[in-house]
């Protein structure tokens, strides 16, 4: 898994045109390094995919994957829209001067404050997730002339997994309205609220999806409902938001589709279904997170201790771990890694890579092969751009790492490394 990296004459790994060992000297470790050209390329694969097919679309970057001012500025430059799921993510969008009319608010428990902030800033769309959202919006919109575009989030009863999908009649999910009963009731309630303009439906069927079948099934389900509503009172969706979940390559076992292929499949199916029921073609919105940033970044660590247990396992420890990448501990996510300063050396040393947190489950990679490792070696882990930094924690009072963007062979610090002052800044004395 090193298609974005090469090796220079020193035998060092080169990422986005720069020697990563030099990057660790300049910015220390652990360090997130994003190849901004790759981010732009991923974004354009979606944007251009729709353009080429002549389809009106919004590609909304799901900012929970990695939100920072610089990242949102890049998203803005690429003409993306933006998903936020909290006030903090909305605040970041405001700080990045992101066009508010292209911001969409999600969340399964939006607070009154969050909704008020979204209304005040006139964001583009609120995705209604439950009856509590409707009640709060009704209250907040009561004596204003304000209007807000909304989508109804539904669970179409399809659970897409990496390589297959499951049809579940009644989806057991904390998100959205069930399609059988609740969606219609939500539709009726929303119609009664003067300020709400219902644009259509939203669904998000899963993450790290490598096939298009799940999306196609979901579109079929959504259209059964839309056809009913059209028959009942002529409602036509002007937007169909099909969520995110497009898979990326973490290890060589993953074989993602070219991003354009997802776009083609979605457009074909929506066109087919709209035609079948005599409905006009809606705008298609999607919400990729991982597929925009996931494979655009690496994390660099310094190797420290080793523990060799004959016939059992060799542990190699790094200066980070679940505090900067909780995915292996949270859902057995797999990663590939190399020793960046020994990029040419044969991989002869079987080992497992441990974090430095006080938690036995803090393991980054099990059973891999590295060159013979020594303290001070630099470990580079691939495809860490999504849900790494954004899920970082202060467990064990580790300061959060720095984030660097590289473009045109130039490295720019875009998130500062935290200090111990940062880590303790909210602590108050009690003596
Ligand atoms: C998490 C999420 C996304 C992004 O998922 P990815 O797998 O990162 O593409 C998009 N939409 C919604 C509603 C989500 O919850």
Image: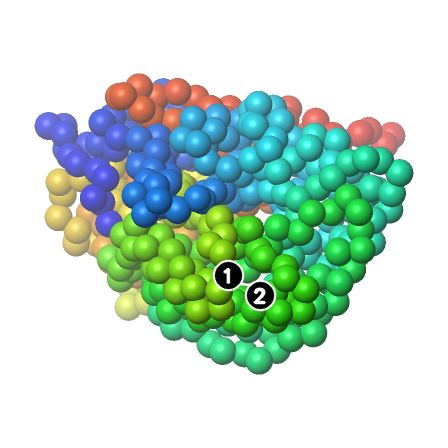
| Residue receiving disc 1 | 279
Along the viewing direction, whichever of 390 and 123 lies nearer the viewer: 123
Which of pointers 2 and 1 indicates the residue nearer the eye?
A: 1
Left or right: 100 in relation to 142: left
Q: Quadrant of residue 123?
A: top right
* Identity of the residue furthest to the left in this view: 9
Along the viewing direction, whichever of 147 and 79 lies nearer the viewer: 147
Say which element carries label 1. loop
Res 286 visible: yes
Left or right: 98 in relation to 327: right
**CA–CA distance between discs 2 and 1?**
9 Å
* Identity of the residue furthest to the bottom in this view: 169
The answer to whether residue 118 is above or below residue 237 is above
Identity of the residue drawn at 25% across and 26% down:
18
Res 324 visible: no
Along the viewing direction, whichever of 404 and 340 lies nearer the viewer: 404
Identity of the residue drawn at 21% across and 38% down:
5
Along the viewing direction, whichever of 226 and 167 lies nearer the viewer: 226
**Mark 2: few, some, or many residues within 10 Å (few <14, many ≥20)?**
many
Figure coloring: rainbow
| Number of numbered discs | 2
| Residue receiving disc 2 | 226
- Residue 332 placed where, x, y %? 44, 62
Q: In which quarter of the image is residue 255?
A: bottom left
- Residue 93 placed where, x, y %? 59, 30
């Amino acid at each position: 898994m090193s298609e974005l990296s090469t090796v220079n004459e020193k035998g060092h790994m080169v990422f986005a045109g720069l020697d990563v060992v030099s990057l660790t000297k300049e910015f220390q470790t652990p360090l997130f390094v994003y190849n901004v050209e790759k981010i732009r390329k991923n974004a354009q694969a979606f944007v251009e995919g729709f353009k080429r097919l002549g389809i009106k679309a919004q590609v909304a970057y799901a900012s929970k994957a990695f939100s920072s001012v610089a990242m949102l500025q890049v998203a803005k430059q690429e003409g993306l829209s933006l998903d936020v799921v909290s006030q903090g993510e909305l605040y970041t969008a405001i700080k990045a001067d992101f066009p508010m009319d292209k911001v969409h608010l999600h969340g399964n428990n939006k607070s009154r404050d969050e909704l008020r902030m979204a209304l005040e800033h006139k964001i583009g769309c609120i995705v209604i997730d439950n009856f509590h959202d409707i009640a709060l919006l009704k209250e907040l919109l009561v004596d204003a002339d304000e209007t807000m575009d909304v989508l109804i989030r539904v669970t179409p009863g399809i659970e897409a997994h990496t390589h297959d999908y499951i049809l579940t009649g009644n989806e057991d999910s904390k998100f959205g309205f069930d399609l059988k009963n609740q969606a219609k009731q939500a539709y009726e309630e929303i119609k009664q609220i003067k300020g709400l303009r219902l644009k259509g439906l939203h669904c998000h069927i899963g993450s790290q999806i490598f096939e298009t079948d799940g999306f196609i099934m979901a579109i079929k389900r959504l259209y059964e409902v839309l056809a009913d509503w059209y028959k009942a009172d002529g409602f036509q969706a002007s937007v169909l938001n099909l969520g995110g979940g497009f898979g990326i390559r973490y290890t060589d076992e993953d074989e993602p589709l070219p991003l354009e292929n997802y776009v083609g499949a979605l457009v074909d199916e929506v066109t087919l279904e709209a035609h079948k029921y005599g409905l006009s073609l809606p705008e298609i919105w999607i919400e990729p997170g991982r597929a925009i940033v996931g494979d655009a970044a690496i994390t660099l660590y310094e190797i420290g201790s080793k523990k060799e247990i004959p016939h059992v396992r060799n542990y190699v420890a790094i200066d980070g771990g679940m505090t900067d990448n909780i995915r292996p501990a949270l859902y057995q996510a797999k990663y590939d890694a190399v020793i960046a300063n020994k990029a040419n050396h044969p991989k002869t040393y079987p080992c497992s890579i441990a974090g430095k947190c006080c938690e036995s489950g803090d393991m980054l990679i099990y059973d891999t092969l590295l060159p013979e490792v020594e303290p001070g070696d630099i470990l580079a882990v691939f495809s860490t751009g999504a849900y790494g930094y954004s899920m970082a924690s202060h467990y064990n009072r580790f300061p959060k790492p720095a984030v660097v963007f590289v473009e045109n062979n130039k490295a720019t610090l875009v998130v500062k490394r935290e200090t111990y002052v940062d880590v303790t800044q909210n602590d108050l004395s009690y003596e």
